[in-house]
């Protein structure tokens, strides 16, 4: 009886030891990335501050990142950030590889760390976009000057369309923002600005034309009851940039993948969902009007 119990105990220990060895061997094997890239491939770290579509439509960006991973063989990782300036800080420290920047954020990044754009999106046949000044249709406000004495929402401090353009318009009228508006709030993104206007929190907002048109086309109710009372002069579309130290081979590969999306059925479908026709190569000259905006006030169009 004692012999049988001892034998059973020995067999139990042997089985447990075998399970532990098997588990350790299993844990030593790295998992295969779901996007089909090599587990040893260098990650491409991506951050987003400029938006082609609303933040609520991040699935479109996820598809873009998956597409890049599939075509380059490098897994992509989305870096979450809280502001446009944080994205620029990460670029300066080379803690991210690729960034989708607002045009205003790009000029700041260029001035601070001399990053160069890779590509920009084309919408309606041109790599251009606008700042839209929005009000509620029943507000009685018909032009920008009518906003004097009313409340207003700015976006991120570096946002061209959400902050820099409306501030330039105020300056063109000879005012400081706090002397022109009765109250000012900062929403930090276009989605929140539109919601603030829809909910009556403010009387006017300035937003990215890409965001507004995307929302209007996909879900008209999301901007129902709002009017565009002013459209800015055209500015270069929000660029995709790469870090300064990115190897030329990888930068060229990204350029090829992004500019070829519209010729690939899978890529074209992703672009369509984002409201973009294609990506094209661009250089800093596309953003001269953005840089000039800070040099002096602009007139409305």
Image (spheres, rainbow, N blue to C red):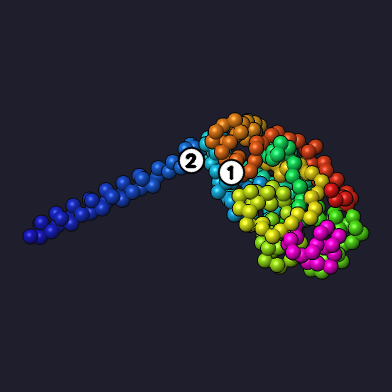
Given residues 52 and 45, the one toward you in this image is 52
From the top left corner, tell me how far across and down residue 87 is, in percent.
68, 50
The answer to whether residue 156 is above or below residue 254 is below
Residue at the spot x=85%, y=64% of the render? 148
Q: Is residue 147 magenta?
A: yes
Tell which residue pokes out farthest to the left in this image.
Answer: 1
Point out the residue furthest to the right here.
174
Mark pair 1, 2: CA separation:
20 Å
Quadrant of residue 167 within the rendered picture = bottom right
Residue at 71%, 58% (x, y): give it. Answer: 226
Measuring 76% from the left and 35% from the top, which residue is drawn there?
283
Q: In this view, does 6 lie to the left or right of 140?
A: left
The residue pinned by badge 2 equals 35
Label 1, residues with CA under 10 Å away: few <14, some 14-19, many ≥20: some
| Viewer-proximal residue among 39 and 169 | 169
- The magenta stretch spans which residues? 134-152
Q: Where is residue 127 in the image (x, y as percent from the top left)?
A: 73, 39
Figure check: 58 above or below 177: above
User: In terms of depth relative to the viewer, which is nearer, 43 or 239?
Assistant: 239
Q: In which quarter of the image is the N terminus?
A: bottom left
Question: Residue at label 1?
Answer: 273
The picture places residue 199, in percent across and down from the top left corner, at 67, 66
The answer to if 174 sits in the magenta stretch is no
Q: Is mark 1 on a helix, strand or loop?
A: helix
């Amino acid at each position: 009886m004692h012999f049988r119990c001892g034998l059973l105990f020995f067999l139990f220990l042997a089985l447990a030891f075998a399970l532990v060895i098997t588990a350790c061997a299993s844990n030593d094997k790295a998992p295969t990335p779901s996007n089909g890239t090599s587990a040893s491939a260098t990650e491409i770290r991506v951050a987003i501050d400029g938006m082609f579509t609303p933040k609520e439509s991040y699935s479109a960006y996820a598809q873009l990142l998956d597409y890049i991973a599939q075509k380059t063989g490098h897994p992509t990782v989305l870096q979450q950030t809280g502001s446009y300036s944080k994205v620029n800080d990460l670029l300066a420290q080379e803690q991210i590889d690729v960034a989708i920047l607002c045009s205003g954020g790009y000029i700041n990044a260029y001035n601070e760390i001399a990053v160069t754009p890779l590509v920009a999106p084309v919408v309606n046949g041109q790599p251009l976009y606008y700042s839209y000044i929005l009000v509620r249709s029943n507000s009685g406000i018909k032009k920008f000057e009518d906003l004097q004495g009313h409340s207003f929402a700015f976006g991120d401090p570096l946002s061209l369309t959400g902050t820099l353009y409306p501030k330039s318009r105020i300056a063109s009228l000879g005012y400081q923002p706090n002397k022109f508006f009765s109250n000012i709030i900062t929403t930090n993104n276009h989605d929140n600005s539109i919601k603030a206007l829809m909910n009556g929190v403010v009387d006017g907002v300035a937003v990215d034309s890409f965001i507004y048109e995307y929302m209007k086309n996909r879900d008209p109710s999301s901007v129902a009851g709002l009017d565009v009372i002013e459209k800015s002069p055209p500015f270069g579309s929000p660029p995709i940039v790469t870090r300064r130290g990115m190897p030329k081979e990888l930068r060229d590969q990204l350029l090829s993948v992004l500019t070829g999306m519209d010729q690939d059925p899978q890529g074209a479908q992703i672009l369509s969902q984002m409201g973009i026709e294609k990506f094209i190569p661009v250089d800093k000259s596309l953003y001269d009007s953005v840089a000039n905006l800070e040099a002096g006030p602009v007139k409305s169009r």
